Amino acid sequence: MILVLLIVVLITGGILAWLIGYFIPNASKWIALLSCLIPFLITANLWQKLSYEIILGESSSLWLIEINTPWIAQLGINFHLGLDGLSLSMLLLTFFLGTMAILCSWKEITAKQNFFYFNLLWVLSGITGVFLALDLFLFYFFWEVMLIPMYFMISIWGSERRIYSSYKFFLFTQASGLLMLLAIIALYFINAQSSGVYTFDYDQLLISTAKSPYSLLIAIGFFIAFTVKLPLFPFHTWLPDAHSEAPTAGSVILAGLMLKTGAYGLLRFVLPLFKDEAIQISNWAIVLGVISILYGALQAFGQTDLKRLVAYTSVSHMGFIVLGVFSFNELAMQGVVLQMITHGISTAALFILAGMLKERLHTRDINQMGGLWTLAPQMGSIGLVFAMASCGLPALGNFIAEFLILLGAFQTQPIYTMVASLGLVLSAIYSIRMMQKVFFGEYQSTINDFKWREKTIMGLLTIAIVFVGLCPQPIITMLQSTVNSSLKLESKQKLKLESSIKQQIKYIKK
Amino acid sequence: MENLIWLLPALPLFGFLLLAFLGSKFNREAIAFIGIGSVSLATIVSLYLAINFISSPPENGFISQTLWQWMQVNNFKVTITFHYDALSLVFVFVITFVGALIHLYSTEFMAHDEYYSRFFAYLNLFVCSMLILVLADNLVLLYLGWEGVGLCSYLLIGFWYKNIKNGIAAQKAFIITRIGDTSLAIGMFLLFKEFGTLTISEISQQAVSHSSSSITLIALLLFGGAVGKSAQLPLQTWLPDAMAGPSPVSALIHAATMVTAGVYLLARMHTIFELSPAAMHVVAAVGAATLLIAATSALAQKDIKRVLAYSTISQLGYMFLALGVGAWWAAIFHFMIHAFFKALLFLGAGTIIEAQHHEHNMFNMGGLKDKLPTVFKTFVIGSAALAALPLISAGFYSKDAIIWYSLTAQNGSPLLWLVAIIGSFITALYTTRMVVLTFYGTSKTSLSYQPGVRMHIPLIILAFLSVFAGFIELPHNFGHVTLFSGFVGKALPTTLLKIEPSESLFQLIAAIVCLVGILLGWKLYSSNREKVIDLESGGLFKFFFNGWYFDNLYKVLFQQPYFFLARINKNDIVDKSNDVIVGISSWLSNQLATSQTGSMRWYVMGIIAGAIMILTLQLVL
């Protein structure tokens, strides 16, 4: 029930914020803050409780908490939510960044406040649903729920080119979402043909043995839907526009959370449901991942718009996720989830910082900035922390993630990993270019340093990124079971390899 | 005593945090107190540990302390563990001791700087990272320190950030060392693949019984990291530009400690390198080539700090030469002595520049001998050590050992020896040039500043060490003191000789070469200044002055193409593919829109034509 509560709080909070906001405009942000903090505290509490269980090894099933009731029984659609270590980590991140997004909009959003917070909370509820849904139809439902409010957020509160960007965002995600819907329906019928049961249920599809000549196509359908969201080269072009035009909170949620739903989809659906197909496409996926890493870094270096720059760094960092996922290695897999978390934190911080700079300077053009350290040393220091996080400085969370991904991926894909490691150099180049352009040099404009609210946001984000950098173990332990279950895949792959080697030996003997 | 190790990095870290968060609230005295205090306390801890370690050596040669588990995934386990052995001890001692002296010097040097607390915060953070680097028990923790010092180096080179030039130098240093760091990271991936662990002691244990073709590759990748950090060929170009930072920074980071991290890494991973003679040869060759290229470049520089920078590269080349030929302890010995005299020289140069209205060009100096007597005396002592003045300078003992081993040790060869001896000749020459141009002749610039006691004390202590530290290790043909090699030998393999010609003869050659260099330098440069300028106007000197044009080469090969690509593709060529889809859609839409004429005739025609078509189709099918 507690899982439903999480979503319900957000949905009703959104409606309340909208309605009450008509009468008391300033109330909506407080309602929003409250309805984001409640789920945060609930998940934090869950984390504490469940981590004991996990350490003690008490939970036997994969799902720590599960709820499953029929929704549209005639079509085999269930309201099936389940929580494991992966979803719990992602939920904690969702509510944490959600709170940050609300706090950073506190002063920024003045027009139609109530509708804004409604949209924001509904996006969050969609994301929460995506991280919990264990019924493919329900998953698709939540997938759409998070899309539409985000479209409004960009198109109403965005900057100059908001209409173009919101269309682009909508079309890209919607088109890829349709591919997923097709894939889901195809999967539904194929399973029904072989087993006679019409169901969208994840657990049942997981054990389904149905084979179909189209399964590769279906897998690719899912793969494209998720990698557009991720985004992977060459589907990344919606992202710089959407990120740069969205209001700060929109960018935070887009980069911090929505991209992660793509990665989550790969981990939750593509790998477990399509083991063999995933292996088949793994080489292509890794090549695209490596291209993303390098291309994103190159593009980030070329940008002059601060938010576009940060957006392209996301493309680069998400490339690591694809590399990690498709190298089928436990270390890399752990790294992938950590990357989802740490990139969420660090990119959110960079976008919030960009938003703060824009509030003060009314520009995102880094050529018009410079020397800001002189007047805003706190801002500069925070910028430095997150620029360094972005280029993978140890002691900050992103290092753990990228290091584990590269270390793990190297065990199976040494050559690609070596090429991907070049990303470490390129990320250093764009990160320090950003520092140089924004904070160093002769100062050109006057600027105020952090206010207490901004200090709180940045302080919390910094603590989070340092904590993950120095003590990632609790998260790793939490994720163990999920990663292990996807590791069965690896053993399957090994078996296959071994048997093929045996066959070859037989041939040779003959 | 093992539970004190954590204090070593923790104390400077605490200083950093205090200054970073509350720096703006303290006055200058308090900032200086915290800055020096934290490092001095660390020095005391390091001395206490060292005395304990030497008086009652632990059985297995090291003590260690585990703080917490960093991460564990399956069999990949990394803890925050410090490992303190003879090798770490030497590095820790140099870092804390020289670090404390440089902090003391900085309180006066930076006294009027706007960003006093930021400076000490960075410096404290640097000492912390460097100590983590040399105390790490596994490569991941080492990498943390490794990147941490890189960050501090970047921040301190660009400390005076308002000047764009400093920013460019800082970025260059960060990026070029990052290339090396990436090589180190890949080396770690490969190590983990081969050994299943990144804990150094476990690697060393397994490596002995491990025969694998990838050992050479691992060694070279690790060496790649060292090449970046220690500014060796081909990644040496960042160090001369790094002189944009304040002089105490150049002394601490770009001479005494950080740039020797590569030497430490190789010494720490010696088991891997010993298994791969090929990699050892590469190390020696790179060291030899670097020492020669850098020495010639130093000969033509006009900026006093750039002379010292190139000379640092060159001396690091000697250390790598020593490592490559298998003279492990000699490299570490030279590291220690070099830390003393090069820190001294940089601090001296900083004082000179400060006293000369921030003039860096030696040709505009001169005649400082009598104006800055203490600086002059200590600087000459440091220069003597750099030039390896026979018998009385510490540099002679450390460098002579390297030159000797480059011929006689396992991987030594006459060619390496020849390069080392030529290098030592050029070193003597450029050192003399530097001293003569700066201190002798007529004064060109008036004195703007007289250094105080906080600057003199570190100079005097370092000058003392630049002479007497050499006596703890004397060659066996005279004196035969092996305090240092005996001690470090506990953590490093012994140096094996393949041939044993008369040591005295080669010492004599080295001594004569050095003296000839000094005399020639004196003769050339103490003459008329115009003649000197004339002498250095040739094409060869220009070639040397520009550091053999490596910068220009990299600019054309890497920098410009990358900038070009980023610039032309700013709007993302991939995005154009969407424009094609958009274009086709709107074209089609326009085509269809033309049928929407509003004319009733056309619509009726359309309906009829459609109806006929459907009917025909039905008939046909």
Image (tube, coloured by chain):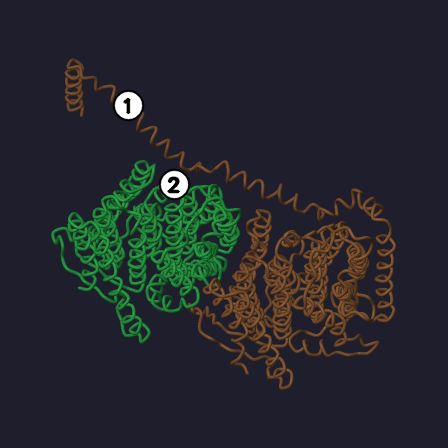
| Furthest residue in direction bottom, as rendered | B56
Instruction: Identify which residue, A152 or A125, lies in the foreground.
Output: A152
Nearer-the-camera pick, A116 or A90: A116
What amino acid is found at the position of numbered circle 2 in the picture?
A: Thr
**Image location of residue B333, percent across then percent down:** 71, 71
Residue count near mark 2 (Cα–Cα under 10 Å), binned few <14, some 14–19, many ≥20: many
The answer to whether B398 appears left or right of A414 in the picture is right
Q: Is residue B286 visible?
A: no
Q: Which mark is residue B590?
A: 1
**Screen quadrant of the N terminus of chain B:** bottom right
Task: Answer left or right for B335 relative to A171.
Answer: right
Residue furthest to the top: B601
Q: CA distance from mark 1 to mark 2?
A: 26 Å
Q: Which chain is brown?
A: B
Left or right, A177 with respect to A449, comes to left
In the depicted structure, whether residue B486 falls above or below residue A349: below
- Element type at marker 1? helix
Q: Considering only vertical position in the picture, is A372 above or below B205? A: above
* Residue B170 in sight here: yes
Quadrant position of residue A343? bottom left
Q: Which mark is residue A237?
A: 2
Assess disc 1: are there few (<14), some (14-19) or many (≥20) residues with their C-alpha within 10 Å of its C-alpha.
few
- Identified by mark 1, the residue type is Asn
**What colour do you see for chain A?**
green
The image position of residue B149, as x and y in percent, is: 56, 62
